[in-house]
Image (spheres, rainbow, N blue to C red):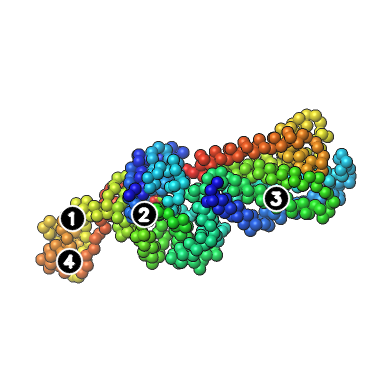
Amino acid sequence: MTADHIVAFKTIIRKEFLRFARIWIQTILPSVITMFLYITIFGNFIGDKIGSIKEFSYIEYIIPGLIIIPIITNSYMNVVGSFYSGRFQKSTEELLVSPVPNWIILVGYVSGGVLRALIVGFAVYVVTIFFIDIPIHNIPFVLFITVLTAFLFSIAGFINAAYAKSFDDINIVPTFVLNPLTYLGGTFYSIESLPQIWQDVSLFNPIAYIVSVFRYGFLGLEETSIYVSLTIIIVFIIILFKIGLIMLEKGIGIKN
Amino acid sequence: MKNALEIINLNKTYRNGFEALKNINLEIESGDFFAFLGPNGAGKSTVIGIISSLVTISSGTVKVLGEDITDNPDWAKKNIGIVPQEYNLNQFIPIEETMLNVGGYFGITREVAHSRTYELFNQLGIWEKKDLTPRELSGGMKRRLMIARALIHKPNILILDEPTAGVDTELRLTMWDFFQEINKKGVTIILTTHYLEEAERLCKNLAIIHKGEIIQNSSMTDIYNMKKNKTYLVKSSDRITSDIKLDSFNVNMLDEYTIEITCENRFNISDIINELNKKSISVLNIINKRNQLEELFMELTNTGVSNDS
Ligand SMILES: Nc1ncnc2c1ncn2[C@@H]1O[C@H](COP(=O)(O)OP(=O)(O)OP(=O)(O)O)[C@@H](O)[C@H]1O
Ligand SMILES: [Mg+2]
């Protein structure tokens, strides 16, 4: 990495940060409001009726999942939105005609997504601690998982953006893939409480692993093997990163 | 000195199977002001897209200042500034910020990019607009912004894909001066335009591409010697009543005051005026029906509007 590359990298991150900061009402605020609603509903209205899961109250049990969901969607939406809109306006050509290596383009966009996910994650956590006293079991681990998760879904967003042919296409994956996987990934219930068959199906849901390690970081409750989960997340990151790089090299979606 | 650009046996077939370039060969010397001409759909922007690595090569070689752009793309990118035909500006970013960003992609720090932007925006007359986004600019201002953006990294080669399209006369003249100025400083300029008079005025050498093939590649002066015939339009001060016949000139009456005269290239305007005077026609005004380049262009590309243009 040369000095030029560092300048280029900083430029991309700065541009990405300013983009989502400028439109914070669309990018940051919605997750904060949703969190507020979840806490009101599950914390007060119906949480008590559900009772507790393991040694935690229902709201405590689902809080980690409620925080990781916006981390997943915001990292994904940030990169898919930004990169697709650049393609749409052709302004990505500015990057393609300059001597920025592909991996810096990819890491730059992805870092933008990670940054937004961290800010949103922090914001929803702040909402949480206004209402519920929930200490974090292992702060560095929670941060680590946040960054890994955001990194993974940022790359996924990037790949989606390169393939998208219209603005509709950038909502397909979030609606039809991410949403079902997060809601079925044990955010609102313990996977162990499901019938065996659904437990087995959940083994193939990568988001279930993320929710579970994130919950471990928060509550110290180990539901699946942390090492297995981490390995799965990292393997996904490596595979998607490679795909993203190959797409840039071949110019898929960006070159004729 | 190395050629600024060398294109060897270049072919391009787009994904849909359309063969846009058919074995193109072209050399452009360093320091040249080069006109790259051709009718709509001829393949000009495709060639430019390939040089700027926005379009992939199907086969063949492109060298920028001696280096193959496939082997050493960064070298080409650092040496080339591109003004694309279509606007490719980020609509949501103030234009000064766009300059700083693009500078950043080239490894230029914000302070340096800022002072270059100040200089370029002033030369191009858009400094007062620096805080606006492209959405708030007129078409001509956006063109100027794209020119400034292409120069932020001080490239040795500037490629202009129809930079004066939709630009008013006054601004066009300013742009011409600006281009000539930087060409004098040693920047090679490759210009695509449909205003042949612009090419004639600015460029030293030219190529004409037609249906993906180079059909003419010469110096601008050669063009003047190439045509066998030329055509003038003559306005007479008095009404012309009888048919006129002239030796060695072909005469065609357009109306009572206007005749069209076609002659061999070796004659000049005074020959025509003398002949007409002999017939006691007083010439009010005489102009080239088309300029030389236009004549040649029409002849070579034979433009009736064809289906694939
Ligand atoms: N992405 C693409 N896919 C398929 N065909 C394309 C693509 N881009 C351009 N073409 C075709 O390639 C040919 C050359 O196009 P190009 O844009 O290079 O022409 P041009 O000389 O720049 O024309 P103009 O003067 O109108 O700008 C045209 O027939 C065009 O339809
Ligand atoms: Mg074109």
**Residue contact at pointers 2 and 4, CB within 8 angstroms:** no
Which residue is at 75% across, 46% downward? Answer: A140
Q: Which mark is residue B265?
A: 1
The answer to whether the residues at label 2 and label 1 have Cβ atoms under 8 Å apart is: no
Q: What residue type is labelled 2?
A: Thr
Which residue corresponds to mark 4? B240
Q: Residue A118 carries which label?
A: 3
Residue B242 seen in this snapshot: no
Tell me, yes or no, whether dots 1 and 4 are on the same chain: yes
Q: Mark 2 and mark 4: span between their CA atoms?
A: 51 Å
* Residue located 40% across and 42% down the image: B68
Disc 1/disc 4 C-alpha distance (Å): 26 Å
Instruction: Identify the residue position indicated by label 2 in the image.
Output: B188
The amino acid at mark 4 is: Ile
Q: Distance between the residues labelled 2 and 1?
A: 32 Å
Q: Do labels 2 and 1 share a chain?
A: yes
